[in-house]
Amino acid sequence: MTEKPAPHSTDDASKVKRLEQFRIYYNHTIHPELLRMERRRIRLLRLLFFSTLFMAGVLLFEFYIDILALTLLLAIPLGAYISYLLYRIQRFRMTFKPNVVSLILDFIDDGMNFDPAHPLKYDPKREIGKDRFQKSRIFATKAPYYSGEDFISGRIGEMDFEMSELHVKELSPVANRLDEVFKGVFMHATFPEEAKGRVIIWPRRLRQYHTKAIKNFTWDKGQNQDKEVNNLKFKELFLTYATEETHVESILSEPMQDAIVQYCASTGKEMYMSFIDREIYAAVSEDKDILEPHLFRSNLSFELVKEFFEDINLLLRIAEDFDQTH
């Protein structure tokens, strides 16, 4: 008798195929753009090198002749030229990421159940608002430091969604400093129909950092519902809280749980999620700035681009799964 494949084997094969397709797309579309940006980076480095030699020569000349009036006179154009160099560096950094992200989004846009009337939109300078972040109830913070970038919005099936990178800090209760609350990619999606039920999951190993958020949810009739989760690996990784009338596995489907477990295991990143009636929130931690270009070394890296693609793709798969199963 032929052995029946595991339930998530099809999902695994689909994920591998999707990554292979992205690798081909990278080679044909993204890599040429990275090569173009690499030539810009090298030209910029040459400019910085010769500018450094020139300014060093000017400073040595000023030191040699030791005339204060001439030194003050030359300080103005030198200062202006340094400002120009800093502008060129900043311009390189500000154009690199939008160019690459736009290409990644073009690939994602063609491969998911997106509404063609609502194509993916990208704004490098915008972020999800603080009030939306706080309404997720994942993080209990007033967020005195709140910044973000790389806002992406669109529609999957019947669900509108938005996401952005966020960096959130709060005042430390024991020291005069700001403690990090969250740094990574945050997504919000809205289910088109009325829905009731509230579920929040937190990384189990970080429970001590979310005590206040957990208490706030329990005061609002939330309870620990780990017993409703059948996926043992998911149960090991996450605390699951929900209101009594909420059926957890009707919201957190088995394929969704498997995808989250595999993603966390392969990347080592933390994942947070909440479902507040018809509002869906998900967050993926990221310690470093994703897709920020290097100046003094090459940016020709598939892994650099792949990481950003996988972060966005996972969050969109969560929204897509919820849209298809509810």
Image (tube, rainbow, N blue to C red):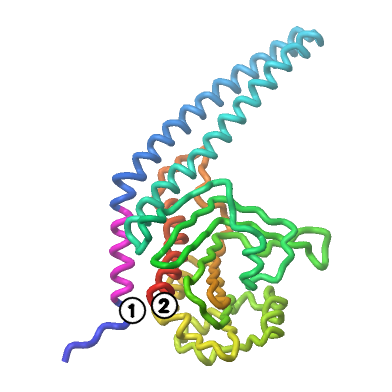
Question: At numbered mark 1, what does the secondary structure look like: helix, strand or loop?
Answer: loop
**Residue type for callout 1:** His
Q: Position of residue 92 (x, y in %)?
A: 52, 35
- Rendered position, 252 above or below 134: below
Please name the residue that numbered disc 2 is placed on.
258
Q: Please say if the residues under marks 2 and 1 sit with CB atoms less than 8 Å apart.
A: yes
- Rendered position, 193 above or below 33: below
Image quadrant assignment for residue 100: top left
Residue 147 inside the magenta-drawn segment: no
Question: How far apart in space, not on screen, are marks 2 and 1 (Cα)?
Answer: 7 Å
- Rendered position, 21 above or below 32: below
Residue 8 is tagged as 1
**Image quarter hosting the N terminus:** bottom left
Tell me the crowding category of disc 2: few under 14, some 14 to 19, or many 20 or more residues within 10 angstroms, Cα based: some
For this orientation, the residue located farthest to the left is: 1
Mark 2 or mark 1, earlier in chain: 1
Q: Is residue 64 left or right of residue 128?
A: right
Residue range highlighted in magenta: 10-23
Residue at point 41% right, 82% down?
254
Residue at point 18% right, 88% down?
2
**Residue type for callout 2:** Asp
**Image quarter hosting the C terminus:** bottom left
Image quadrant assignment for residue 299: top left
Q: Position of residue 180 (x, y in %)?
A: 69, 62
Residue 15 inside the magenta-drawn segment: yes
Q: Position of residue 215 (x, y in %)?
A: 71, 82
